[in-house]
Image (tube, rainbow, N blue to C red):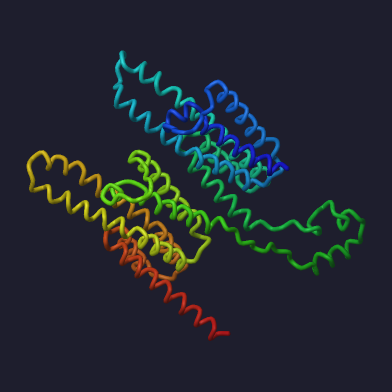
Amino acid sequence: MSKILRIALAIAFIVVFYTGELVGILFDYQGINVVPTPTWFLLLFATCAANVASAFWISRADPPRNLAFWGLFLKVCFLPIFLADFYIFVLMRSWFPPSPEVSPLGFFLITPYVVLSCPLMIVSSCYGFAAIDRARDEQLISPERERKYKWGLALPIADLVAAIWLYARLRRLDGTAPTCTPDDDPLSPAHTTPQPVADIDDILATRPTQTRKAIPHPWPTVLPLAASLCFIIASYAGGPVTMIFPPPYPTLRIDVWFLVMFVCALATIVSADAFKGAHNPKTLALWCLVFKLALLPFFLTMTLIVLVLGSYFFAQRGLIFVTFIMLPLLLLGTYCIMRVTSSHGSAAISRARNERLVRRETANKLQRGLATPIADLISSIRLYTLLRQLDNASETTTSEAL
């Protein structure tokens, strides 16, 4: 019952927040009936209090990993709000420079959105705080690490990173924790019934060691693939490619496209690094190669745009100034997207180097190739081919040994 209640309260909190009138003004909702501000504040306060109660009291019997997961889930769901607030803050600073006459107006305009972000960070961090307390009581983390995680969850921007590392650590510890058997339970009849000491020693000596079977979890596979797929879809859903080749489907506005690309890129990089230990290097290299081939038309279009803008260097003076502004930004954005597509390849190289499948010199050479434009596709092909050959060779050696 507590699990169903926790899920319902978290989803209700997300739905209530995104249907408010202030959020509708921020994201320019059209065709959606938003909740009036007084009613919205009441519902927001009720859902905030319910989620805090769920984190600290209702779900106190849940494992720490589940609490950390829901804290991370809420932070990821509210990431667009945090990014929009940061964008508004930077915009207000540029519109209202520091001065005694203008600063109060800028402070008055930005205060509602800053106050709006506070309950989101507090409520989403409550699940993390509850997970830290449970993990400390179960002696899964040390007191020093507990203080470090709590400080991270209490600080803006750093709270998302702390939530990711907390969930990754608790998940790793939960996968290696032994299962409590009736023989290990001090309250079981086998321990409470008086028995001779010799019989207990014989039982302990002959009892087989109980180990927990590893149950495959779908999240290490689903999250990296979902993040990469969202990044690919977002790349073709707006931006320069749709400006050059208008698609038949609706596209995102350029400001929304930048925000969606940033969120998807961050999710791809974090998931590739956090879950690289759950897959072998060959699988990671295959994902990197498929990722780059899926975005190959995007890079070819960007190359075409760069060549067209480069021709304006020989045009009249006004166009040269425009080209000096647009061309570096275009090249920088393309390079950042290329580095995102190399995230799975970098994880594969790191795994292969740690497992001593490739030499350090070869790993450094492949890393430089993945960081170089145009050569990154060739390096990803070489990396997958090399790891596939090594995997086939190890399977052949194992079959011959058997």
Q: Measuring 81% from the left and 59% from the top, which residue is drawn there?
A: 183
Horizontal relation, residue 282 to residue 254: left or right:
right
Q: Measuring 73% from the left and 64% from the top, which residue is drawn there?
A: 210
Q: Is residue 159 above or below residue 178?
A: above
Q: Position of residue 20 (x, y in %)?
A: 51, 28
Quadrant location of the N terminus in the rendered image: top right
Residue 74: which quarter of the image? top right
Q: Measuring 39% from the left and 21% from the top, which residue is drawn there?
A: 109
Residue 127: which quarter of the image? top right
Comparing 31 with 283, the one in front is: 31
Horizontal relation, residue 190 to residue 145: left or right:
right
Q: Position of residue 246 (x, y in %)?
A: 30, 49
Q: Position of residue 163 (x, y in %)?
A: 53, 43
Q: How many marks?
A: 0
Quadrant location of the C terminus in the rendered image: bottom right
Q: Measuring 8% from the left and 48% from the top, which residue is drawn there?
A: 314
Q: Is residue 344 above or below residue 56?
A: below
Residue 260: which quarter of the image? top left
Q: Position of residue 227 (x, y in %)?
A: 46, 52
